[in-house]
Amino acid sequence: MKVLFDTNIILDVLLDREPFSRDAAILMAKVEQSEIVGFSCATTITTIHYLSTKILGAEAASRHIQSLLSLFAIAPVNRLVLENAFAAGFKDFEDAVLHEAAVHAGVHHIISRNIKDFTNASLPVHEPREFLAVLDLLKRAE
C-alpha cells in the first residue's frame, strides 16, 4: 500500500512535536519495516530542508534530508501536477500540489493532520491515528 506523508507529519517526527510525534513515528516505522510504501512530495523535501536549516542548522538539516531520501519514494512535481493542482479547487495550493503529486505517483492514501484542507481530494486522507486503525483492521482481516 502506497501512502504519502504530508509535510506536517514528517515535521512532527523530526521536530518531536508533541502530542503528534508518537503516531507519526509509528507510521514512519511502518515504512522502515516495509509494511507500507512511504512517499513524500518533492516539495515536502525542500520545505523540510528550509525549515530544518533555520531551526536545527545546516548539518542537521542535511542529515534529515539524507534520511528522508533513503526512507521515502518521492512523488515528483512537474508542470502537469502543478496545472492539475491549480484546477483542483483546493483552498490551499500547497495541499493541492501534494494531492496531485500523490495521484500521479499512484499513491493510495494521504496522511495529514490537516484533513479539512483536503475536502476536494480524490484520494482518502487520514489523520495518523485514524490510519493506524485502518492498518490494524486490514491486518485483522488477513
Image: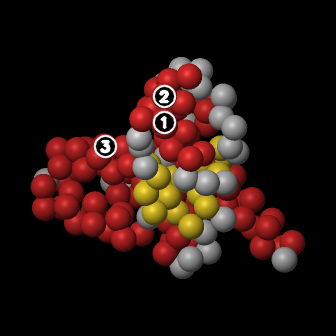
Q: Are the residues flagged by discs 2 and 3 in contact, CB closer than 8 Å?
A: no
Q: Quadrant of the N terminus?
A: bottom right
Rendering quarter of residue 59: bottom left
Q: Are the residues flagged by discs 1 and 3 in contact, CB closer than 8 Å?
A: no
State the residue at coordinates (54%, 79%). Answer: 33
Residue lying furthest right in this view?
141
The numbered disc on residue 4 is none
Q: Secondary structure at mark 2?
A: helix
Q: Amino acid at mark 3?
A: Thr
- Cα separation, mark 1 vs mark 3, equals 21 Å
Q: Are the residues flagged by discs 2 and 1 in contact, CB closer than 8 Å?
A: yes
Q: Is residue 98 left or right of residue 129?
A: left
Name which of mark 1 and mark 3 comes first in the sequence.
Answer: 3
- Cα separation, mark 2 vs mark 3, equals 20 Å
- Cα separation, mark 2 vs mark 1, equals 5 Å
Above or below, comparing residue 71 to residue 33 in the picture? above
- State the image coordinates of residue 37 (x, y, percent, origin top left): 56, 67
Q: Secondary structure at mark 3?
A: helix
Residue lying furthest front in this view?
80
Q: Amino acid at mark 1?
A: Leu
- Residue ID for mark 2: 83
- Residue ID for mark 1: 80
State the residue at coordinates (56%, 71%). Answer: 30
- State the image coordinates of residue 92 (x, y, percent, origin top left): 49, 25
Q: Amino acid at mark 2?
A: Glu
- In the image, 87 versus 137, the foreground residue is 87
- State the image coordinates of residue 45 (x, y, percent, origin top left): 33, 51
Mark 2 Cα-neighbour bin, 10 Å: few <14, some 14–19, many ≥20: few
Name which of mark 2 and mark 3 comes first in the sequence.
Answer: 3
Above or below, comparing residue 90 to residue 130 in the picture? above
- Residue ID for mark 3: 47
